[in-house]
Image: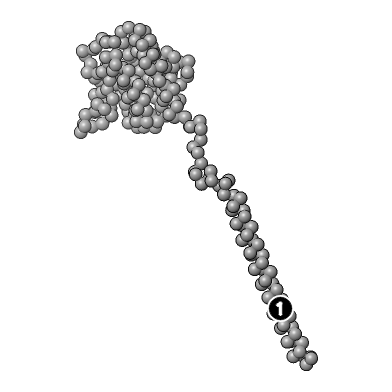
Amino acid sequence: MATGGDPEHQWDVFISCHPNQLSYVLEVLTQALENIGQKVYLYERDSEPGAAIADNVFNAAMTSRKTVVCFTQDYLHSEWNLYEAMVAQGVKPSGGRMVPIHLLSCQIPQKYQLVCQLNCTDRLHRRFFWRKLLGALDIPNSSDIAAQLNVAYPEGCLDMLLGRHMPDVVPNPPPRSEYEAPRQRPQQAAERAHVDHQEQLSHLFAAVFVAIIVCKMFDIFVKFVFGI
């Protein structure tokens, strides 16, 4: 599934994402696009060691035909990611070079909503993920290629990404001690009852002993006072 190249640019696509979504970008977006002949730039994989981060980001945006920005809550909390989005938008403010993807639910700033977004937060929209993405990247025969990608990566595999950010449906099992606790309770109750019985006997013996002492002292007192 070869696609047309662009001799004016070193890269076809610069994908800007937060590290928390990097595994999805590598395993799905990058893999799918490179399988159809696109040259993809990822900062974590393709940046030049030793060069300034800002220079790497700027060069990636300038030497790529398109920049795909994966907006998530994580992305909006990262200063470097917002810098990448700003550079991507600044290359051509009127639109066309920046392709914003609303990857996970978040409030995208108004200044990045000047161009149409690829909405992935709604299941219905995810059905058109590949067709819209390939069309935005100006890939020839995008409809036919999108049909093939829908087979290999249904709905952009976005359910997998969303699942990684949702709490587990089945809660984590309690520690083993909690499982054993119900079985231990009858034995513990018997042991506790035995201890309580011993304590009661001890208290009774102590009370009898004190009573005998008190009676003896009272008898001595009477004899001493009254000379009986």
Q: 192 or 227: nearer the eye?
A: 192
Question: Would you call the spot at circle 1 few (<14 residues within 10 Å), some (14-19), or many (20 or more)?
Answer: few
Q: Position of residue 21 (x, y in %)?
A: 37, 28
Q: 164 or 38: nearer the eye?
A: 164
Q: 115 or 158: nearer the eye?
A: 158
Q: Quadrant of the N terminus?
A: top left
Q: Is residue 76 above or below residue 146?
A: below
Q: Which residue is mark 1?
A: 212
Q: Position of residue 115 (x, y in %)?
A: 39, 16
Which residue is painted at 37% across and 23% down in the image?
Answer: 70
Q: Is residue 189 above or below residue 179?
A: below
Q: Is residue 135 visible?
A: no
Q: Is residue 71 above or below residue 97?
A: below
When asked about the image quadrant of residue 94, the answer is top left
Marks counted in the figure total 1
What amino acid is at disc 1?
Ile
What secondary structure is marked by label 1?
helix
Q: Residue furthest bottom?
A: 227
Q: Position of residue 164 (x, y in %)?
A: 43, 29
Q: Is residue 48 above or below residue 93?
A: below
Which residue is painted at 71% across and 76% down in the image?
Answer: 211
Q: Quadrant of the C terminus?
A: bottom right
Q: How is the image coloured?
A: one colour
Q: Position of residue 74 (x, y in %)?
A: 40, 31
Q: 168 or 129: nearer the eye?
A: 168
